Image (cartoon, rainbow, N blue to C red):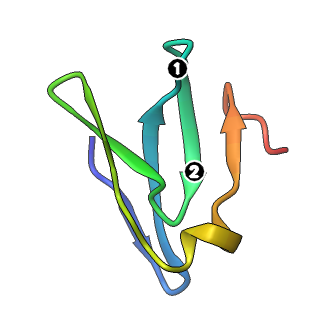
Amino acid sequence: MKSSASSRGFIGVLLSDEGRWVFGKWACGVIERGVERLIMNALIEEECILTEGGNIK
């Protein structure tokens, strides 16, 4: 899966502890060979917004 770049950052995906797909602003994480690899970014602290099942919270 590729992340989409935008003027505000990236939109990526990560796998939650419950094994669900979660979408996050600023590329909170990406799936690589089934392993969750977190991306550390200074902006994540305040800009990271997670959703479950594609529903915006």
Where 6 sits versus 24, above or below? below
Image x and y of residue 51, in percent: 70, 39
Which numbered disc covers residue 24? 2
Label 1 environment density (alpha carbons within 10 Å; few <14, some 14–19, many ≥20): few
Q: 52 and 36: which one is in front?
A: 36
Q: Position of residue 21 (x, y in %)?
A: 52, 25
The count of marks equals 2
In space, the residues marked 1 and 2 are separated at their CA atoms by 15 Å
Between residue 13 and residue 40, name the one nearer to us. 40
Furthest toward the left, the residue is 33
- Name the element at disc 2: strand
What is the three-letter code of the residue carrying label 2?
A: Gly
Give the answer, above or below, for where 32 lies relative to 5. Answer: above
Label 1 sits on a secondary structure element that is loop
Earlier-in-chain disc, 1 versus 2 = 1
Quick check: marks 1 and 2 in contact, CB under 8 Å?
Answer: no
In the image, residue 41 lies at what x, y percent? 43, 73
Q: Is residue 16 left or right of residue 29?
A: right
The residue wearing badge 1 is 17
Type of the residue with mark 1: Asp
Residue drawn at x 70%, y 72% is 46
Q: What residue appears at the point 63 percent right and 61 percent down from the top-left corner?
A: 48
